[in-house]
Image (tube, rainbow, N blue to C red):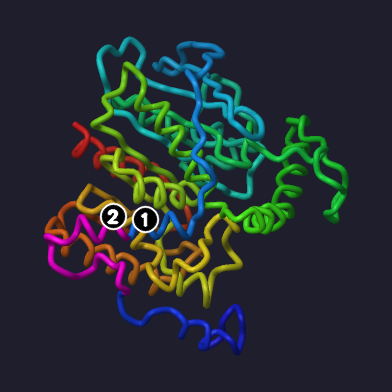
Amino acid sequence: MKTVIGQYGEWAAGLLPQEPGALSLQRGPREELPVRRDKARARVLECMAPPPRPTAGAPEILWQREYDGLHIEALRWVMPYGSPTEAWVLKPAGATGRLPGLVALHDHGGFKYLGKEKIAQAGPEVPALVQAHRADAYSGLAWANEAAKRGHVVLVHDAFAFGSRRVRPAEVPLILPSTVVDDADDSSHGMTAYNQWAGMHEHVMAKSLFSAGTTWPGVFFNEDRLALDVLCARDDVDPARIGVAGLSGGGLRTVFLAGLDERVTCAVCVGMMTTWRDFLLNKSHTHTWMCYVPHLPRELDYPEILGLRAPRPTLVMNTRADPLFTGPEMERAAEILDKVYAAAGVPDHFRCSWYPGHHQFNREMQAEAFDWFKRWLA
């Protein structure tokens, strides 16, 4: 069998545990689940090595408006490093009382110039690149808006190294084989040039984070957890009814945020479920440096990170022609999560759905996700 590391694939795969490890929740007495889950969660965090947890004061409201039947706020909060994080909060216009909250996590998509704008819309003008991205990945929809229309307070923020949090080329030495990029040029040409530059810079960021004693998952988890803090602190949100969802890079972030933060009542991971074996042998070249946590694969398989949230409800959505994963390993990941939820005594709290087509979160998939949230957050 050919592997992405050639003759070394079989040897490297042999380094992974052949049976569920000591931290696994796939088996064992049910009454021991809470203790074992706490130990596993602590080990995941140890391997991720997140930097000191950031805090933010009350977010600044930049503007408010009504659009698309929604009340929309633009927020900004200051970070202890880098540019402030910008976010949008969307909810039904005229809504009163506390509503279920939802953290909508934008994708990677090789598109770092923007973040929240890929899945949310605050006005009639939409950049051509965003229109094309949504047409390919989301049936042309701003899915965060669609979720808000169904009665949620939806927070969409820019992830680390995206949008308002993106790396500024002017602050980086000329170390990459590319022309100087003006990251303030928001034309289609300017965004494309920046996205190409950012793609080449990604391995630099990952190596530098490793050299600082942290990881990319540790950093984005910290920042996503801070966004969850902001959402849960709102007067219009019921903190006992919180959902998290995202496609692709947003699905990756869902795995970590929903798996590690018990405030997440209900989770939907779209287009980002496979195994460490799949990354190792077949698909590491199709994925961002944002995925990897040193040492963890020897102790806990990738789907088991999401499984740390059992028995809380979880929906995984896959597409059969997704080029980012292999079918057998996606199936194996779903089987692992089935076992985790069966061991927790709540097999009906987990579902894996399969759709035809490429890597996407299309209209039909969104409808199922929204129904899942309605079922568990009502």
Residue 24 counted in the magenta span: yes
Task: Tell whether 321 sits left or right of 79.
Answer: left
* Residue with the mark numbered 2: 38
Q: Which residues are magenta?
A: 21-39
Above/below status of 256 relative to 293: above
The one of 46 and 89 positioned closer to us in this rendering: 46
Q: Residue at x 54, y 12 (%)?
A: 63
Q: As shown in the figure, which amino acid type bears the numbered disc 2?
A: Asp
Quarter where residue 171 is shown: top right
Q: As shown in the figure, which amino acid type bears the numbered disc 1?
A: Ala
* Residue with the mark numbered 1: 42
Residue 240 counted in the magenta span: no
Query: How many other residues sit within 10 Å of disc 1, few (<14), some (14-19) or many (≥20)?
Result: few
From mark 2 to mark 1, how far is it between C-alphas? Answer: 6 Å
Q: How many marks?
A: 2
Quarter where residue 340 is shown: bottom left
- Residue 189 position within the rendered picture, expressed as x and y whole percent measured from the top left: 77, 38
- Residue 73 position within the rendered picture, expressed as x and y whole percent measured from the top left: 48, 17
The one of 105 and 135 positioned closer to us in this rendering: 105
Q: Residue at x 85, y 51 (%)?
A: 178
**Which secondary structure, mark 2?**
helix
The one of 36 and 205 positioned closer to us in this rendering: 36
Q: Residue at x 83, y 54 (%)?
A: 176
Q: Which mark is residue 50?
A: none
